[in-house]
Image: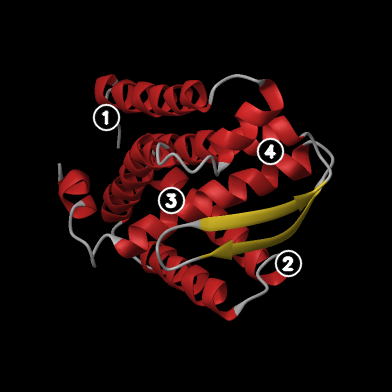
Amino acid sequence: MLAVIIRQIPIVSIPFNWLESYFHEISHGLAALLTGGSIIKIELFTNGAGLCTTRGGVSFVITFMGYAGATLWGWGIYTLAGAHKRVAQYFSYFILLVLACSVIFWVRDLLTLIIVAIVISMFVFLVKMKTLQYLQIVLQFMGIIILLNSLFSPMYLLDGRNLGDGAALAASTFIPELVWIVIWCALALFACLNLAKSPRKR
C-alpha cells in the first residue's frame, strides 16, 4: 500500500521512476549482450523516460525485454530480498556492481550520470543498514515500486503517436501494439499476484 501511495506523490515518486527506468533500459542492454550484440550508451531523462542504444543482437528480444525485464527485476528483487537476510545484502551489492558498470561503460552524458548516481546512493544507503531485516524490507519496497511502475508504464504507449517499444514490435512482427502492451501488463500483473500469494520468509 505504501508503494501505491508513493507512486501518486509527484516529487517523491521521481527517484523511484528513475529506478524503474534504469532497470528497463539495462534490460534492453543485457538482452543485446546475451544475444551477441553490444551496448552503445544508456540515457535517462528527468521525466522518467530513457533510451538504450545497442548494436547487433536479436532485435525482437532486445525490444521486448525492456518492459518485461523491468518486471523480472522487480519480481526478482522482492523475492530474493525476502528469501534471506544475507541474500538481500549480497544481491544489493550485485545491483551496485551493475550500476557501477553502467557508469563506467555506457553512461555518456551528465544528466544520466546524475540520475544513476542518485540510484546508486539509494543502494549504498541500503547496504550500509546495520539491521539486515530493515534492508530486506526497504529492498522489497523497491522491488514492488519497480514492479508497479512496470505494470502501468506500458499504458503510456497508448498515446496514438506510434512510438516506443510496442510500435517497434508491431512493425517487426505485424502484431498490433496493443497486444504487446497487454502482454507486458499481464506479465507484471501475474508477478504481483504471485508475490501476493507467496509466503514471507526472513
- Secondary-structure class at tag 3: helix
- Classify the position of the C terminus by image quarter: top left
Residue 171 lies, in percent from the top left, at: 66, 30
The amino acid at mark 1 is: Arg
The amino acid at mark 2 is: Phe
Residue positioned most to the front: 160
Sequence-first disc among 4 and 3:
3
Residue at which label 2 appears = 105
Residue positioned most to the bottom: 110
The front one of 195 and 151 is 151
Sequence-first disc among 3 and 2:
3
Residue at which label 1 appears = 200
Q: Distance from label 1 to label 2 (Cα)?
A: 37 Å
Name the side, left or right, on which 139 lies relative to 7: right
Sequence-first disc among 1 and 2:
2
The amino acid at mark 3 is: Glu
Sequence-first disc among 3 and 1:
3
